[in-house]
Amino acid sequence: MACHPGAIERRGPISFKTGSEPGSYQLAMLFSYDQKIGQDHPTLVTGLLSINWMPEQLNVQAATLRFTARARRNLVDATEAELPAIRAWRSAFSAMGLKPTKYRCASEALLRRLRKDGALPRLHPLVDLANAVSVAHAVPVAVFDVTHVSGDLTVRPATGQETYRSFGGADENPEAGEIIFADDDGAAHARRWTNRQSAASAVSENTVAALVVIEALHADGEAVVLAARDDLAAVLAEQGAETRTEVLRGGEGHFDTETDKP
């Protein structure tokens, strides 16, 4: 989240066509996993959604509220820590040497906030929608502004030389071996796998193209990931956004976000 064992050949920096109408933007990047990720986590399922164009105004409040209400219902009979999807991430974090109650996957952190505060933070319509889908399905949903990703995006162990930009503005160097989302220039766009994204590629009012990554490790992970991805895609389609979807299993293969549009 660089050429490492199992990495695919890169094709240079991301490119996109500028414009304000559908079809104006064309992504050209690859998303993949280092082979060690699949070896260590063979049950991994990844739902991917590239947003190649979206309108400046997203009217997704109703959908966001609907998904958040579903999450509240799921928390009536169980805490977030008891949900199968969260238990699987806790086990993975423990295996990586991370204390699960100190470093939580993004979906657990959001569910915990929803249970305690009764609401989720409002940030940006796309992020708010993704967060609502995340808590509804209890799986981490990451959204990257791909115009701030250099080249391709690979989930891999850190070398210790990469740079991560926190939302507080500080630059950090992930520890060697820590799973990160890294681009070709060595920027870490997420730390501790699904724990925390970087401010460097955060969605903003200027975002015109994005990559959504949805991951699960539990037994029914594929069905849940596909449902979350398709829920998000359906809402965006209603808004006129142009999207493309894919699924990766066991960290194998790659997702080419480039479209066939002229």
Image (spheres, rainbow, N blue to C red):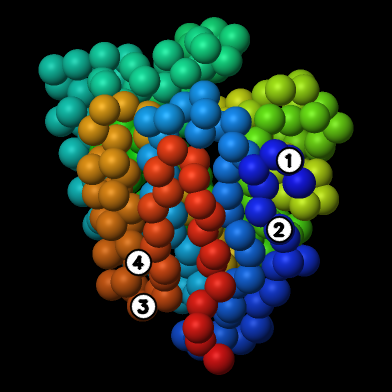
Q: Which mark, by number, is residue 83?
A: none
**Is label 4 in contact with label 1 (beta carbons under 8 Å)?**
no
Query: Could you tell me how far apart the alpha carbons at marks 3 and 2 are, in whole angstroms?
Result: 33 Å
What's under tag 4, amino acid-wise? Answer: Leu
Question: Residue at position x 18%, y 28% from top?
Answer: 74
The residue at which mark 2 appears reads as 9
Provide residue 118's location: percent of width, then percent of height.
30, 28
- First-in-chain label (1 vs 3): 1
- First-in-chain label (4 vs 1): 1
Provide residue 222's location: percent of width, then percent of height.
29, 41
Would residue 33 be visible to someone looking at this image? yes
Would residue 107 be visible to someone looking at this image? no
Label 3 secondary element: loop
- First-in-chain label (4 vs 2): 2
Mark in the foreground, 1 or 3: 1
Provide residue 220's location: percent of width, then percent of height.
23, 33
The residue at which mark 3 appears reads as 240
Q: Is residue 127 above or below residue 44?
A: below
**Is label 1 in contact with label 3 (beta carbons under 8 Å)?**
no
What's under tag 3, amino acid-wise? Answer: Gly
76 on left or right of 86:
left
In-front residue for pair 205/156: 156
Q: Is residue 171 above or below residue 59?
A: above
The residue at which mark 1 appears reads as 4
Extreme residue in the bottom direction: 262
Question: Residue at position x 54%, y 66% from top?
Answer: 257
- First-in-chain label (3 vs 2): 2
